[in-house]
Amino acid sequence: MFPFRKSPAFILSAIILTAVILVLALNKSGETVEAPVTAKIDESPASEKPDPGTEPAKQSAEVNSPSVQTDIPSLADTFKEEFFIGAALEPGQTSGLSAELMKKQVNMVVAENAMKPASIQPIEGQFQWEQADRIVAFAKANGMAVRFHTLVWHNQVPDWFFLDADGKPMVDETDAKKREANKKLLLGRLDAHIRAIVGRYKEDIQYWDVVNEVIEPADPDGMRNSNWYKITGTDYIETAFRAARDAGGPGIKLYINDYGTDDPRKRDRLYALVKEMLDKGVPIDGVGHQTHISIYSPAILNIIDSMKKFKELGLDNQITELDMSLYNWNDRTDFGDQVPEEILRKQAERYKELFEALKSNKGLVSAVVFWGIADDHTWLSTFPVERTEAPLLFDKKLQAKPAFWAIADPSKLD
Ligand code: GLA
């Protein structure tokens, strides 16, 4: 294997050289590892701060092990009389620092992907429960509520749902009789999917997104022209809610979830659909407002007004996927490593405005769920383009940002 034989002297000098290089490298990394960024709004007056020179042991512990802040308020406690505070997570985040941060800050979780149709039933009849189970177990062990997301969606749904008995796409069928048979087959599959899942988790999960993103004002009749809609009209929505109620009983709460519900056009189409369904006795308990917003729009008042409208219909509201992009929707630029302070400040002011509006409208929402826990893990770092994003309350090192203080204790922002 080795083409050359080395003399003992050669081997000894190689060992010594390697050791010298290692020592130098270790020294260097000791100098450059950064301490975790502490809260941007520092509470302690300068005179009370320890002199780093007098506390060498503490300093080096901080330098070497990033940790979750334990000496800051808990959002879950702060809002416990008003609404749940939640976060989306992946199964891998049920341990480690993200898990510690969630244990401190939230009392509700939702699976970012693990409970979507493609994750749970990728092949007909073959349910994959492990990842979803991990999230449920984490929530139970820590006394957290769970939102299920989502029984029905047009994305992250496997193709097999929409193939006819011969394996051909149902949407291509032109024969009226066969179209009717396909519709029956699809609704039967949907019913079975929902009963299996709700049956398994009904004791552990109280809040359920039954359908996600079914409204699209630009599509015919304002309904998203998905495979679901093309094959069944709005029957899939009705089937889904009825199956969920039937399998889960009256104790679980069923939601219709969507983004952009602050936009009057979308809101009104959603309102009309929900009203039509309720009039038919379809069991809808609430509206999930995703609330993926930016530091520029929409107006907080529009978000609140939309929720008030659904409340008047007797429904609950939950904010289900809250995050706040640093960029305007049409902007594809990138702050890179240097997000300007004034941008983080603007984000904090907007979060403050939203939470103040929620507090002054007591009972308007029963939960506020963030789409992630910290900026180290957010879908917005790759969507709509890959770039620096910081839409959440904790930074990439899991330390509280101005936006956290804006919510937890706004007096710390001044
Ligand atoms: C939508 C879905 C979520 C998630 C986000 C982006 O809002 O409801 O499940 O996929 O898009 O990640």
Image (cartoon, grey):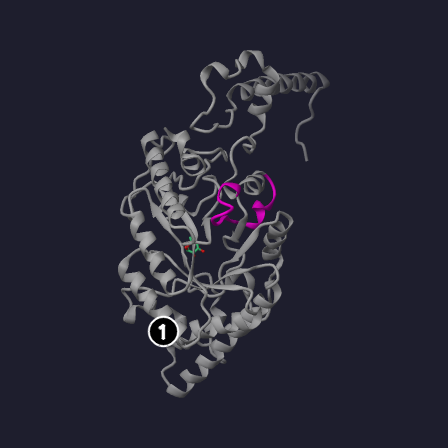
For the N terminus, give its image quadrant: top right
Q: Position of residue 355 (x, y in %)?
A: 39, 44
Left or right position of 204 against 156: right
Q: Is residue 261 visible?
A: no
> Is 175 drawn above or below residue 42 in the view shown?
below
> Is 137 drawn above or below residue 58 in the view shown?
below
Ligand 1 quadrant assignment: bottom left
Disc 1, SS: helix
Find residue 71 and report its image quarter.
Answer: top right
Of residues 86 and 31, the one nearer the viewer is 86
User: Is 79 within the magenta?
Assistant: yes
Most extreme residue toward the right, as rendered? 8
Of residues 214 and 116, the one nearer the viewer is 214
Label 1 CB less than 8 angstroms from ligand 1: no
> Is 33 drawn above or below residue 356 in the view shown?
above
Find residue 211 and report its image quarter.
Answer: bottom left
User: Which residue is identified by label 1?
Assistant: 276
For the C terminus, give its image quadrant: top left
Magenta stretch bounds: 77-96
